[in-house]
Image (spheres, grey):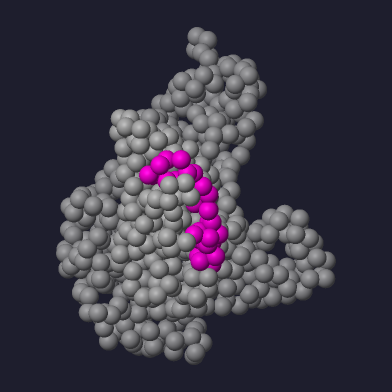
Amino acid sequence: MSRELREEAEKEFQAGSLRALICTSSLELGIDIGSVDFIIQYTSPRETTRLVQRIGRSGHTLGGTSRGIILTITPDDILESAVLIQRAKEGRLERPIIHEKALDVLAHQIIGMLMQQRRMTVEQILQLVRRSYPFRDLEVGELEEAIHQLDELRLLRKFGDSYSPRNPKALQYYFENLSVIPDVQKYTVFDFFRKRRIGTLDQDFVARRCTAGVEFILHGQTWRVISVDEEKFHVEVEAAPPSLKAIPGWEGDMIPVQMDVASEVGKMRRTLALSGQSESGLEEAERERVASTLSLQGKQAKIPSDKLVLIEGFENSVIVHTCAGNLVNEALANAMAALFGSRLGSNIATQVDQYRFGLIFPRPVSAHMVAEEFRKLTPNDLESMIHETVEASDLFAWKHWHVLRRIGAVSRQAEYKARQARLLVDIFKNSIANKETRRELFAEKLDVEGAKKILAMVSSGEISIDVIQDVGQCTPLALPLLDRIVPHGLLRPAIEEASIIDVVKSRLLSTKLRLLCMNCGEWDGIRKVDNLQDKIRCPKCRSTLIAATYLSDDALPKIILKKIRGGRLAGEEEKEWMTAWRSAGLLQTYGKKAGLVLAARGVGPTTATRILRNRIGGEDSLYLSILRAEREFERTRMFWD
């Protein structure tokens, strides 16, 4: 929604002419939205502070009562919401995260102070900075590191024991970095089938979430990522079935559920499983729904809780059920993935939520082996593994890029590119940018101390471990995570097959090919695929040895003439000649059908030969084979460029 439409909706709601408003957290804070009667929260708000703030927008008068309801969709959602409501009633709110000793902010403030005071010593800067609560414990060495970094970036200069700003560069740096909120570009999203624009996504969402296979929601439709082009800022997608697992395109991050909330949900599971009752105040229908899920879980395996970790194998994934919250589970998943990655010599993918994390292996791995390694993992091992491997993550590169911007090492106009960002991580390895990025990640994304606590409780026996190996069906409590990992194929296609075929057929038949005679070298023509004959001949020499290429291929005609006249071809020219020769052979054998396949994006003679030879079924089967080849090219072309 554009800013104008959003502001118009807010004004109408405030005036009372608009009686209901569906919104994101944008109306949670910051503005007076007038008189609100009732709040409907869809799914768990994930934090007690969010619950209190959102429901508190209603009845916002002296002596008024705030009224609202939470609509839940899963058993986990029900229990989590019940825990948050109870915590709100008891006044137990989450402690805010205070960013202490943020070195990028410190660097910016140093330049600001020098611009105002003209010249300051290290002692004067330290005395002033320490008056701010987040920097109360700042060490002289940390301040000197920041000053040294600014000196290397030529933003300040030293005069004896004092420092002064190096203008005009310092002035530009200061005013371009007044905000710590990152500037992000927009990526254009294209429908792969219909070759049309469908919307935009923020750069941070694309950089951190959009890999091949990820599903997200845009304009009410679910889309699956096929490929990302960082140069053109394009994302190619295909329609996917509606799914609750799809990430809303506007939502880069889910609010993390903290460890104590997840632990209380685990305790509630345990209480309900033992007695069928809980002190949460659940209504009968909600309690029965949760109890039914727990009963099904109990028939297959033990019920994971605050006192039990269940490790479950399913196909090539292992789900570790830990009621420990998002940030703790992120830390545990990172450590276990690093451990098995080094053991198996391959990358181990992960998926995480607040009640479980999944390890995705290239081949099936025993859940008992994962359980054994989990038991042996010590708190110190976990901490060292995470510190050693965190720099290799995409999230680290993304955050590191923006830290470099905030200290003036990267221009505000520079565009984020994953490969460049990765190189900069290596270049600034020993800088304050690396330290600051680590500090931010461990403050916002990874709860290492909480993870160490879980491992200590496992070691002492306070938390027990149980294992279930793949029995052909996952447990009910594993399904929320496995839905993101294992394609079930249970839902109908998002676009009916017949509709897909019509779109692909229309596009390919209207595509133009450049046809070249390899016998005489004198004919160079352009034809639409729809106008091709089953027997294609050169109008000059009547040969059927006709090669097909793309319209802008101006090199091939010269190569063909050079070959015909007996010239010696260079290495690349020889490759081009052989590719053209193979395409000519296909057109001789298959005629128009070969032209149809060669008109597809990224389909050369080798792939076209496979499609045409292995074709089973009618015309529809051919178009679906072409589409699969195009999708595979789009998915892998970054490795071919």
Q: Is residue 63 above or below residue 378?
A: below
- Residue at the spot x=23%, y=52% of the render? 346
Q: Quadrant of the C terminus?
A: top left
Q: Is residue 308 above or below residue 398?
A: below
Is residue 621 inside the magenta stretch? no
- Residue at the spot x=49%, y=90% of the render? 284
Q: Is residue 381 visible?
A: yes
Expressed as whole percent of the image width and height from the top left, the position of residue 423 reads 39, 34
Expressed as whole percent of the image width and height from the top left, the position of residue 243 reads 48, 72
Give the farthest residue toward the top: 160
Expressed as whole percent of the image width and height from the top left, the position of residue 40 reads 63, 75
Q: Is residue 387 visible?
A: no
Is residue 509 inside the magenta stretch? yes
Depth order, front residue of 83/244 = 244
Q: Is residue 260 above or below residue 268?
A: above
Expressed as whole percent of the image width and height from the top left, the position of residue 61 reads 76, 68
Query: What span is in magenta?
Result: 503-532
Depth order, front residue of 236/169 = 236
Q: Is residue 211 above or below residue 126?
A: below
Q: Locate residue 596: give its quadrant.
A: bottom left
Depth order, front residue of 289/457 = 289
